[in-house]
Amino acid sequence: MAEIAPKNGEFLDGKLWFQRKGSIVTLGLTCSAVEELGAVEGLEFPNEGDDFDKGEIVVTVEGSQGKIDVITPAAGLIQEVNEAAQDEPDRVTEDPLEEGWLVRLEIQDTSDLKEYVGEDD
């Protein structure tokens, strides 16, 4: 399993990654979060079109050794949930950085992400 997330930033003490393309932000768990959780057993996703403020819980991931509440690093609307991961939660365990992404949201203000990225990003 690759250790480098396809990301623009990590947050929540390195447990979550995000990647931004324009105003669309994809969220997922880092490898260290998956190691801490154990096998992913269940995911509670929002509905497409749901509106969230920065810092709100958008997904809850249940693992064999605990759970992680995934928060959004920026305010926005849910554009897509990873239905494949919802149907097969082990995708998140096996490939958290690619096929195991969680949600995509359209953010309202990209400056919300500034605290999570380095100067060169």
Image: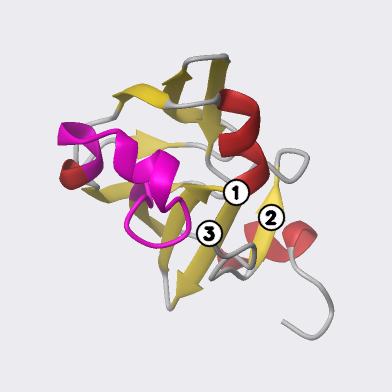
Q: Secondary structure at mark 3?
A: loop
| Nearer mark to the viewer, of 1 and 3 | 3
| Nearer mark to the viewer, of 2 and 3 | 3
List the residue tagged with mark 1: 30
Mark 3 neighbour density, 10 Å: few (under 14) some (14–19) many (20 or more): few
* Dot 2 amino acid type: Glu
In the rendered view, does 39 fall on the left or right side of 55? left
Q: Which residues are magenta?
A: 85-103
Nearer-the-camera pick, 56 or 29: 29
Q: Position of residue 42 (x, y in %)?
A: 32, 21
List the residue tagged with mark 3: 1
Q: Image quarter for residue 106?
A: bottom left
Label pair 2/3, CB-CB below 8 angstroms: no
Q: Residue at x 39, y 62 (%)?
A: 98
List the residue tagged with mark 2: 10
* Dot 1 amino acid type: Thr
Taking 76 as reference, is 39 above or below it?
Answer: above
Taking 87 as reference, is 79 above or below it?
Answer: below
**Magenta residue check for 48:** no
In the rendered view, does 33 fall on the left or right side of 23? right
